[in-house]
Image: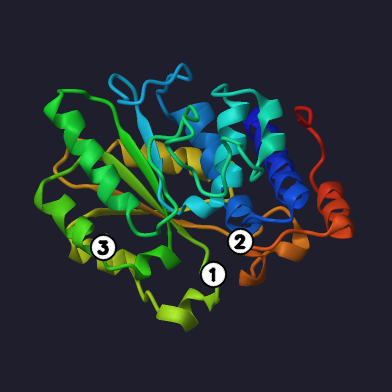
Amino acid sequence: MNNLKDIATQIRRDIVRMVHAVQSGHPGGSLGCTEYFTALYFEIMKRNPGFNMDGKGEDVFFLSNGHISPVFYSTLARSGYFPISELSTFRKINSRLQGHPTTHEHLPGVRVASGSLGQGMSVAIGAALAKKLNNDPNIVYSLHGDGELDEGQNWEAIMFAAHKNVDNLIATIDRNGQQIDGTTKSVMSLSSLKAKFEAFNWQVLEMNGNDMDAVIAGFNNAKSYLGKGKPIVIIMETVMGKGVDFMEGTHEWHGIAPNDEQLQKALAQLPETLGDY
């Protein structure tokens, strides 16, 4: 577990350095979801870094809230999908590491473009149904922002998944309570997500997304409900900006980059554990 925590610290360090270098990107949600990505790619998911686009014979992951690409790219690089040195090209012209993940860049690990919010649930459900048709026993994982649930397409997909008994899907909602214009409560109150998903006939679980032990336990608990007739959702409580004290708990760091002084303050809180790119 200590190794996973070291990986998470290094990924956080990558995030702030990547965003600072081009003065563009989304550090807040990326920092908040670091334990999730670390646990998923280094402990939970049965995956192939050699990367086949169709994902047959392995677990697959879809990132719906694509603006948190810094944490996704760092995780993919650190887990062997492409060279860690490529992180230095983030958001630069002709880079494979665009601000939102794209498929035409042919970046290993990316199976869907996710610049438009609200579409990832539909994609994940389609992939899960394809695995059923192919008699592939592996799992589909997906991650969604809570503010992203303002998009109506999600709820059509959520209703469809329960109707079709898509029970090989583990979707996770990053419940940080923040979105670009303010708190989710002030922009569009989501009220009880647990009650909403239960009303749509999903198996609903909850976990602390910033505690590595809790995340590992949460994933393993979710896997125990696979194949039982219901799609599974984990409502994951996180703190936006987690790990950098002046970024924590505010929407203000949703999509801005730290200046030179702020970068140094952030890095002082995130010791280098695996080596910088």
Q: Residues within 10 Å of mark 1 (few under 14, many from 20)?
A: many
Q: Residue 209 location in percent, x, y?
A: 52, 51
Q: CA distance from mark 1 to mark 3?
A: 20 Å
**Are discs 2 and 1 less than 8 Å apart at CB?**
yes
**Quadrant of the drawing holding the N terminus:** top right
Judging by the rendered image, the residue that carries numbered circle 1 is 178
* Residue that appears at 23% across and 62% down: 198
- Going from N to C along the chain, the mark reached first, 1 or 3, is 3
Q: Nearer the viewer, residue 91 or 244?
A: 91
Residue 207: give its label. none
- In the displayed structure, 143 sits above or below 152; it is above
| Sequence-first tag of 2 and 3 | 3
Quick one: which residue is furthest to the bottom in this view?
186
Relative to residue 184, is residue 114 depicted above or below? above
In what element is the residue under mark 1? strand
Q: Relative to the observer, which residue lies in front, 109 or 198?
A: 109
Q: Are marks 1 and 3 in contact (CB under 8 Å)?
A: no
Image position of 137 (left or right of 239): left
Q: Is residue 209 above or below residue 130?
A: below
Q: Mark 2 or mark 1: which comes first in sequence?
A: 1
Of residues 105 and 198, the one drawn nearer to the viewer in this rendering: 105
Q: Is residue 56 above or below residue 44?
A: above
Colour approach in the figure: rainbow
* Mark identifier at residue 153: 3
The residue that label 2 is drawn on is 240
Residue sitting at x 12%, y 29%: 133
